[in-house]
């Protein structure tokens, strides 16, 4: 892997997120054992995003730089939608986007991919900045972003890491436990 | 199928539950032929570990026959006889690449719960061992789902007796890693606290790795007898002798070169210190009773190593860190990096260097599994190791 620092690969300032003054910012970072090009390519193919973004119920690609997002809120009871456009795209290194004018939730975001020296993997850093519409900030957070937006961003990145490293996200949903009605899996008996 | 489920503190039940099925493409389902109850299951039974839910299927030591594989399983086949390591690992992340399998980044689907406890990234998922470790259904059942089937399960010869290889699932590698972590050199004296199965395998492993003498510490005569006769250790009954004084005397005044705490968070002891921990844990002011750990830190020779295979779950009180610092000790601990040890230790068994079945005291059917937890917890009936046969 190339032994370069972040700054040699991409200029880090200005963040697109800095366009919004006094926004509600979240950022998170994770490291995964795949090349930066692979994560970049997966993310840039925007239809992959619902595979690891828990609240993104669907995404529609509307142009080479534009897409339409449907975001699940209020624990799945409602959906909000917006149009997004990619405003900076540095292959293998950075994608930055902002919501288009007139969106319910105005925001900017960027994700950067930095390959670490000595086979330490690729650092994936996300920064999102929401422009709060009227009302109190707390109310906005709870209604739109869920109870723990920072934690959920981290969870999204953890799922991305599993997809990139293993190809799949491990689950225990649907496994057997006590107190459930007994059911039979015919495949367990078929080979006898 | 039938399974042993956790119903609450000191309450287990054998009940009928849904058969497991493939949930991820790399899964297999194993028909369990033999499974064991681990000393660390007693921590769950006693309610010492947080993160259990009513209905959780117990068990992390099991083996059997592969009966179903997911679409992405390449190596494992239906009909294979396998032993399953209790730590679950993806085989692809940073830590798996470093042979640190029990620190796998991807195998705990409930990692945020563990991170609150760890103050950092979660370790690997474990079978049947709380929702902090992923909430995976365990193997004290007729069938069990095994994720990452091409990474974990160890194929063993079809004609080998289950009892000889079952403990590759946890306690033999755990005892072996505990001894390996001691960095044993020729002439070394190793002290082992706790003569349960992990302690006994740690004694055997310490000798295999070249220890000159092993001194084993416990209070139960039947365990001390096994340590002495089956494993060749010198023994100390801590209810009869002052452990620190005795160890000093037996090691030329300087203490053992390495100490292994194979007891963990529910240690028993004598005197004021034990009373102190009982009161504090009962008042929820301390989560663990680190009596064996304290003794091992005090006993260890300057520059020595304290290796901790015993499980700890939370916050400890009055740990003599000054002693550890003052003597320049090395501390090694953690869940076992199982996958690293499976093949080498299987080879030792196949070469007749060790027969792990010596620790088995009880063989029972699944229907009797719920009640025997109480028997073992009360240390009745001479229990050293319980194996459940399906």
Image: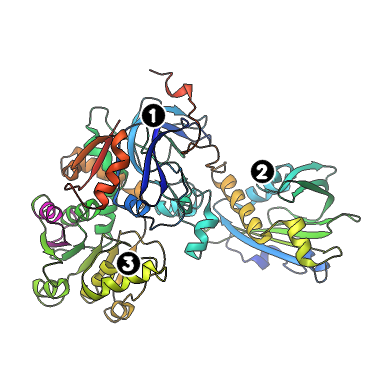
On the image, the x and y values in percent for residue B140 come to 36, 38
Marks 1/2: CA–CA distance:
30 Å
Q: Which residues, given as a range, are shown in magenta?
A: B208-228
Neighbor class of circle 2 (other Cα within 10 Å; few <14, some 14-19, many 20+) is some
Q: Nearer the viewer, residue B207 or B236?
A: B236
Residue drawn at (36%, 59%), measured in percent from left and top?
B334
Residue placed under numbered mark 1 in the picture? B66
Count of marks placed on residues: 3
| Left or right of B84 on screen, residue B232 | left
Neighbor class of circle 1 (other Cα within 10 Å; few <14, some 14-19, many 20+) is many
Residue placed under numbered mark 3 in the picture? B289
Marks 2/3: CA–CA distance:
44 Å
Marks 3/1: CA–CA distance:
40 Å
- Give the quarter of the image for residue A154: bottom right
Chain for mark 3? B
On the image, the x and y values in percent for residue A127 come to 71, 62
Asked if disc 2 and disc 3 are in contact, CB closer than 8 Å, the reply is no
Tell me, yes or no, whether dots 1 and 2 are on the same chain: no
- Give the quarter of the image for residue A122: bottom right
């Amino acid at each position: 892997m190339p032994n370069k620092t972040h700054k040699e690969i991409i200029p880090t300032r200005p963040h697109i997120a800095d366009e919004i003054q006094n926004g509600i910012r979240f950022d998170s970072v994770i490291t995964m054992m795949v090349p930066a090009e692979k994560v970049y390519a997966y993310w840039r193919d925007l239809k992959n995003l619902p595979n690891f973004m828990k609240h993104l119920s669907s995404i529609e690609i509307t142009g080479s730089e534009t897409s339409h997002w449907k975001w699940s809120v209020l624990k799945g009871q409602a959906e909000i939608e917006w149009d997004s456009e990619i405003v900076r795209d540095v292959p293998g290194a950075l994608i930055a986007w902002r919501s288009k004018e007139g969106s319910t939730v105005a925001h900017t975001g960027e994700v950067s991919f930095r390959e670490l020296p000595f086979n330490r993997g690729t650092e994936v850093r996300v920064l999102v900045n929401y422009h709060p519409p009227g009302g109190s900030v707390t109310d906005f957070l709870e209604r739109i972003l869920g109870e723990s937006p920072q934690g959920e961003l981290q969870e999204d990145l953890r799922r991305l890491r599993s997809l990139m490293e293993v190809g799949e996200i491990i689950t225990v949903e649907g496994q057997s436990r006590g107190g459930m009605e007994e059911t039979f899996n015919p495949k367990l008996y078929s080979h006898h | 199928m039938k399974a042993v489920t956790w119903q609450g503190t000191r309450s287990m039940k054998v009940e009928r539950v849904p058969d497991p099925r493939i949930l991820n493409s790399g899964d297999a389902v194993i028909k369990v032929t033999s499974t064991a109850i681990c000393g660390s299951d007693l921590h769950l039974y006693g309610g010492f570990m947080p993160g259990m839910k009513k209905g959780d299927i117990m068990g992390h030591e099991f083996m059997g026959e592969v009966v179903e594989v997911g679409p992405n399983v390449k190596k494992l086949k239906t009909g294979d006889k396998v032993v399953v390591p209790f730590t679950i690992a993806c085989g692809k992340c940073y830590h798996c690449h470093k042979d640190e399998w029990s620190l796998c980044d991807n195998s705990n689907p409930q990692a945020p719960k563990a991170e609150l406890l760890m103050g950092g990234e979660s370790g690997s998922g474990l079978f049947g061992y709380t929702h902090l470790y992923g909430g995976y259904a365990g193997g004290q059942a007729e069938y069990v789902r095994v994720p990452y089937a091409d990474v974990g399960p160890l194929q063993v010869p079809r004609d080998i007796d289950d009892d000889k290889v079952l403990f590759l699932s946890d306690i033999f590698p755990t005892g072996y890693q505990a001894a390996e972590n001691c960095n044993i050199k020729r002439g070394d004296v190793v002290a082992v606290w706790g003569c349960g199965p992990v302690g006994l395998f740690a004694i055997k492993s310490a000798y295999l790795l070249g220890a000159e003498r092993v001194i084993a510490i416990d209070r139960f005569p039947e365990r001390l007898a096994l340590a002495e006769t089956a494993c060749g250790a010198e023994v100390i009954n801590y209810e009869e002798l002052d452990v620190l004084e005795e160890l000093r005397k037996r090691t030329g005044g300087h203490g053992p070169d390495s100490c292994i705490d194979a007891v963990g968070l529910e240690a028993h002891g004598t005197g004021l210190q034990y009373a102190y921990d009982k009161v504090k844990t009962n008042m929820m002011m301390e989560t663990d009773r680190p009596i064996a750990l304290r003794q091992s830190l005090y006993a260890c020779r300057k520059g020595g190593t304290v290796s901790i295979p015993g499980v700890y779950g939370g916050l400890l009180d009055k740990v003599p860190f000054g002693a550890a610092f003052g003597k320049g000790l090395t501390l090694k601990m953690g869940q076992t990096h199982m996958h690293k040890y499976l093949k080498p230790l299987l080879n030792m068994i196949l070469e007749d260097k060790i027969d792990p079945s010596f620790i088995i005291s009880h063989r029972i059917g699944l229907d009797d599994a719920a009640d025997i937890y109480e028997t073992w917890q009360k240390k009745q009936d001479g229990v050293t190791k319980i194996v459940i046969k399906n």
